[in-house]
Image: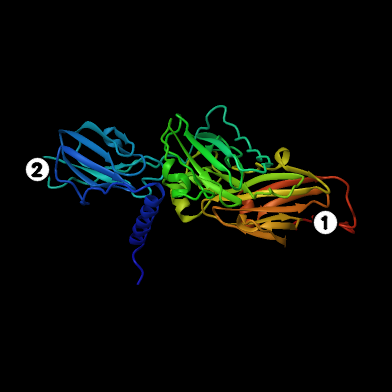
């Protein structure tokens, strides 16, 4: 008989904690777990990934209470008790205190407000026990749910598109210095729908990093002072602890630097690896690093940089305004939007990819995810060469190629006929959620390649 769903979820959190320990370093062991504190005016809470110990705190009514939050985890945590206006924030290894008067008997919730932490289990209850009570009475009535959308800040626009990094064109290895900054930027995701993206250098995807096999890469990650949370980077091209994430858990206003050798050629995803990792990735913290082979990649006429991501919003899918993340949908893998390059229509119309008949095209395509696999396809074209999952050697004449979450590929083809070609995830329900881009090809038509004998009324599709 299967375990209860709650136990399954706790087991998954345990696995996650082990993975985080390997990725960003082990946390100090928490104090022995207890279900509830004794009745006290001197409360001590220990925060780790992702829990408080104890989770139930008992204090006497009418007394001045001192509460101490000790963070024994590997990342930042906080403690918010809305009923008594208590908010403590503690970086890893730090201890913070607050004093308040518990003047209202009852049961009150507390939580970690770092995005995703409450949903992962960081919540508890403060029980204020009145004189003569064995335990507090029923909890106060729950406040109404906040609206799913807020006002869009004045001046909100669209995120800029990242450029394709130029070919390396070097015959010898070199030291390459790369600097990225984590920035939290409010921008439009779709018409009338804004979202606070978490980005590298203000774009989704982040900048393409392009190096040569054998290069030594010195990467500096800064976190903007305006950020609200810690960010990091895990590069799949790195051989080392956490792909770099272990040493780049960077608090707002801080920075970290490490070096790695680009050992293997290919195209690799990089992403944030700060818990809740899926939340950081879904919010835009992903990009590609291309490691060219020693002889470089074959020359082509055009190169493009496209990445797919899935987003999960609180409330109805098309509700206008500034939207927030839905952790419930994220964990259930029910995205509201599946997009190329961070938003609906990012690579259409004036922003469409462009080429001319007879040119060769290369697309660096990756999937940030965090959840969905892409069935990448260009309607009306056949990939002459595909480097599956970013591999060094191509396969030939491919119609659709699978790209997993956290994976990437290179596709190459010659454009032989003018027209507008649609890039899609061929799980075509996602087309309605935004997964579409355009490649506009100009030039002379060759009827030997394609010729209209008689068009149908309302012809469409493939």
Q: Which type of secondary structure does the marked residue at label 1 adopt?
A: loop
- Looking at the image, is 257 positioned above or below residue 214? above
State the image coordinates of residue 88 (x, y, percent, origin top left).
30, 34
From this viewpoint, is residue 286 visible?
Answer: yes
Q: Is residue 328 shown left or right of residue 211?
A: left
Residue at horizontal 76%, vertical 56%?
381
Q: Is residue 73 shown left or right of residue 376?
A: left
Residue at horizontal 69%, vertical 41%?
169
Can you say which quadrant of the picture contains the N terminus? bottom left
> Residue under circle 1?
457
Q: Residues within 10 Å of mark 1 (few under 14, many from 20)?
A: few
- Looking at the image, is 401 positioned above or below residue 53? below
Number of numbered labels in the structure image: 2
Nearer the observer, 86 or 28: 28
Whichever of labels 1 and 2 marks the residue nearer the N terminus, that label is 2
Q: CA distance from mark 1 to mark 2?
A: 83 Å
Q: Which type of secondary structure does the marked residue at label 2 adopt?
A: loop
Residue at horizontal 68%, vertical 49%?
295
State the image coordinates of residue 393 (x, y, percent, origin top left).
66, 58
From this viewpoint, is residue 314 visible?
Answer: no
Nearer the observer, 251 or 131: 251
Q: Is residue 276 shown left or right of residue 177?
A: left
- Tell me the tag on residue 132: 2
State the image coordinates of residue 202 (x, y, percent, origin top left).
56, 35
Q: Residue furthest top?
A: 154
């Amino acid at each position: 008989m299967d375990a209860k769903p709650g136990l399954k979820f706790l087991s998954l959190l345990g696995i996650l904690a082990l993975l985080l320990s390997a990725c960003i370093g082990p946390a100090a062991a928490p104090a022995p777990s207890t279900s509830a504190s004794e009745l006290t005016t001197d409360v001590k809470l220990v925060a780790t990934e992702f829990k408080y110990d104890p989770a139930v705190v008992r204090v006497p009514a009418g007394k001045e209470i001192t509460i101490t939050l000790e963070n024994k985890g590997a990342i930042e945590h906080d403690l918010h008790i809305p009923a008594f206006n208590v908010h403590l924030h503690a970086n890893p290894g730090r201890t913070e205190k607050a004093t308040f008067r518990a003047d209202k008997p009852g049961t009150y919730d507390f939580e970690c407000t770092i995005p995703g932490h409450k949903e992962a289990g960081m919540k508890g209850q403060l029980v204020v026990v009145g004189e003569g009570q064995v335990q507090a009475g029923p909890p106060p009535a729950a406040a109404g749910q906040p609206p799913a959308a807020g006002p869009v800040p004045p001046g909100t626009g669209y995120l800029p598109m990242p450029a394709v990094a130029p070919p390396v064109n070097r015959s010898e290895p070199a030291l390459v210095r790369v600097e990225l900054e984590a920035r939290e930027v409010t921008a439009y995701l779709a018409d009338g729908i804004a979202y606070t993206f978490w980005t590298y250098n203000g774009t989704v995807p982040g900048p393409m990093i392009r190096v040569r096999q054998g290069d030594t890469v010195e990467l500096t990650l800064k976190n903007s002072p305006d950020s609200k949370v810690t960010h990091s980077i895990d590069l799949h091209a790195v051989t080392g602890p956490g792909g770099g994430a272990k040493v780049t858990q960077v608090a707002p206003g801080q920075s970290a630097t490490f070096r790695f050798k680009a050992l293997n050629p290919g195209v690799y995803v990089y992403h944030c690896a700060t818990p809740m990792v899926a939340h950081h990735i879904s919010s835009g913290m992903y990009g590609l690093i291309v490691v060219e082979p020693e002889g470089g990649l074959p020359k082509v006429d055009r190169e493009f940089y496209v990445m797919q991501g899935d987003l999960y919003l609180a409330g109805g899918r098309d509700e206008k305004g500034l939207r927030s993340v839905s952790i419930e949908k994220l964990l259930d893998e029910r995205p509201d939007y599946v997009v190329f390059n961070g938003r609906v229509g990012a690579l259409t119309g004036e922003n469409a990819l462009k080429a001319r008949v007879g040119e060769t095209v290369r697309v660096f395509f990756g999937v940030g995810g965090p959840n969905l696999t892409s069935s990448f396809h260009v309607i009306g074209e056949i990939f002459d060469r595909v480097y599956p999952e970013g591999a060094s050697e191509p396969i030939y004449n491919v119609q659709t190629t699978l790209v997993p979450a956290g994976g990437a590929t290179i596709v190459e083809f010659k454009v032989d006929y003018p027209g507008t070609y649609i890039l899609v995830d061929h799980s075509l329900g996602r087309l309605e959620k935004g997964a579409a881009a355009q490649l506009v090809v100009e030039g002379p038509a060759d009827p030997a390649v394609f010729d209209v004998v008689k068009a149908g009324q309302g012809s469409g599709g493939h």
